[in-house]
Image (cartoon, rainbow, N blue to C red):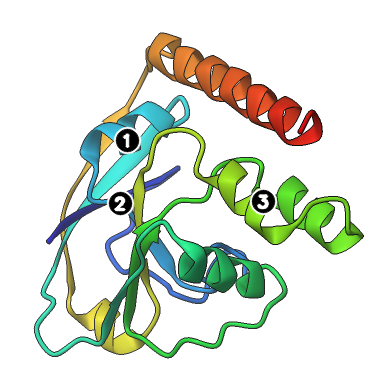
């Protein structure tokens, strides 16, 4: 599997213990198989690192965009990672996930409504390398420096998402 990771530098030897513990799939080294997504979300003067993952012998858990995925992310945001896999693959939660979880815990939004909100927008895939065993099977291929990005497509996607999200919220409260 060919995967990409965007950073401010070349990363030949990934560290699974760097970054946020409360990320979507917990602590790990995050990548995506979607090269276009990587380039669209990269900041100015970023470096896109390319890797190949040998999946043989790895315990890989794949999440569809469903209730189990939602619950797993919900628990990880509370630092309760209950899954022991070498690699976790699944959708990236949209940018409203922190707000959505806060609204659920406040009692203002039912979990089934929150799940509907998390389904809004395009679905991009993330791959979290969770164990040293998996890191050893991740081979660095190359890196590419990005000097300047065209932000128009990203801006349009974000505007469409915000409009769809606002319409969904309005529909929930006007039942």
Mark 2 or mark 3, which is nearer the start of the sequence? 2
Residue occupied by mark 3:
114
Query: Helix, strand, or loop for circle 1?
Result: helix
Could you tell me which residue is drawn at 62 percent across and 22 percent down? 162
Label 3, label 2: how many angstroms apart (C-alpha)?
25 Å
Q: Position of residue 174 (x, y in %)?
A: 79, 28
Q: Quadrant of residue 6?
A: top left
Q: Residue at coordinates 74% horizontally, 26% vertically from top-left?
A: 170
Pointer 2 with pointer 1, Cβ within 8 A: yes
Q: Which residue is mark 2?
A: 32
Q: Nearer the viewer, mark 3 or mark 2?
A: 3
Tag 1 residue: 37
On screen, residue 27 versus residue 108, left or right, reads: left
The image shows residue 91 at horizontal and vertical percentages of: 40, 54
User: Which SS class for mark 3?
Assistant: helix
Q: Is residue 58 above or below residue 174?
A: below
Residue 42, image x, y percentages: 42, 32
């Amino acid at each position: 599997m060919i995967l990409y990771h965007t950073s401010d530098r070349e990363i030949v030897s990934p560290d699974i213990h760097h970054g946020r513990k409360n990320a979507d799939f917990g602590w790990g080294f995050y990548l995506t198989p979607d090269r276009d997504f990587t380039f669209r979300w990269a900041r100015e003067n970023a470096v896109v690192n390319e890797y190949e993952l040998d999946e043989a012998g790895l315990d890989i858990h794949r999440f569809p965009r469903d209730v189990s995925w939602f619950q797993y992310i919900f628990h990880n945001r509370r630092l309760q990672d209950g899954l022991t896999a070498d690699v976790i693959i699944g959708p990236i939660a949209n940018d409203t996930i922190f707000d959505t979880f806060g609204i659920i815990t406040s009692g203002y939004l039912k979990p089934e409504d929150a799940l509907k909100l998390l389904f809004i927008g395009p679905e991009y895939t993330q791959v979290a390398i969770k164990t040293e065993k998996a890191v050893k099977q991740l081979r660095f291929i190359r890196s590419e420096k990005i000097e300047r990005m065209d932000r128009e497509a990203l801006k349009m996607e974000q505007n469409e998402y915000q409009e769809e999200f606002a319409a969904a919220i309005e529909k929930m409260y006007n039942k």
